[in-house]
Amino acid sequence: MQNVVAIPANPALVNSTEDFLRAVSRNGDGATAFITMVDRLTDRMLGLFLQEPAQLADLSNTQRKVIDFAVSTASKASHMLTRQIYKKVSNAEFAPIVRNVEAMYWQAGDDNGQQAYISIPVDERFANDFRRAAEACEAGRGQSEVALVAQVMDQLTNEILDNIFVAQTRLVKVGFVTQKALNMGVEGSRKALQAVNAKVLRGLSNDELQRFMGHYAEIIRQRG
């Protein structure tokens, strides 16, 4: 069994993922389908990791502004860069990305409670640290372990950005100017997301941290 970060896929993400795989296999418009899939994936990530947890805590106006800025920064960067990078990619050029998507797409079945996921493998050390942080928050010790909570959330951000989003860009030709814009967009999104961990998580109470990490309780799973 492999430890994975497993992002629960909502119907929009499931449909767009299957539409992309179907479009390429039938020589349809793979580029448009992939761009739509990435848009849906971005929406799901921002909802799961920023917008939904924000409803679980009594945040100050400053904390909400930090979250809103992170959502706006990441959403705009993803929307713009996805179109720049993939709009002219042929179905043949999508072949390695198709293999990645097929590997990440954990279809609903008996092995995952009939819930589809987008999943990526992670090492045992990170999986154990994440579970330890979640357990501390569940036990009401979140504030005393907030450094660990922030650390695992930072690493979770990096895992998702690098292995779900950036990894696909390495499989297609990207011009110098677009590559520079990609680097800036990714790092800007990374900093904005990590600012949430630094400025929001550390200000939460034990009860709020319990609810916050409880939101992610099943995100580290094992996949056969």
Image (spheres, helix red, strand yellow):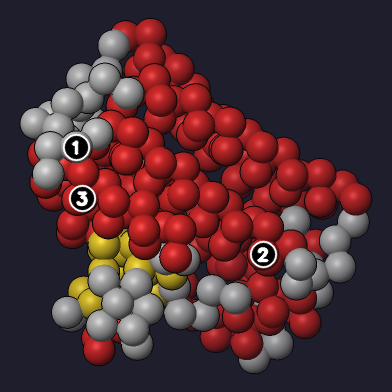
At label 3, which amino acid type do we have?
Answer: Leu
Left or right: residue 108 compared with residue 75: left
Q: Position of 190 compared to 70: left or right? A: left
Please tell me the numbered disc located at residue 28: 1
**Secondary structure beneath label 2:** helix
Position of residue 48 measured from the top left corner of the image (x, y, whole percent): 57, 62
Percent x, y for residue 166?
Answer: 34, 37
Vertical order, 95 against 134 (above or below): above
Q: Nearer the viewer, residue 103 or 67?
A: 103
Along the line of sight, the residue nearer the viewer: 5 or 11 = 11
Give the residue pinned by disc 3.
21
* Residue occupying image coordinates x 23% and y 77%: 223
- Residue at x-position 26% and y-position 62%: 105
Q: Which of marks 2 and 1 is in front?
A: 1
Q: Which quadrant of the view contains residue 85? A: top left
Label 2 Cα neighbours within 10 Å, binned few <14 / some 14-19 / many ≥20: few
> Label 2 amino acid?
Glu
Q: What element carries label 1?
A: loop
Spatial CA span between label 3 and label 2: 29 Å
Q: Which mark is residue 126?
A: none
Provide the residue designation for mark 2: 52
Seen at 22% across and 24% down, the residue is: 89
Write the residue at 21% across / 44% down: 23
Q: What residue type is labelled 1?
A: Gly
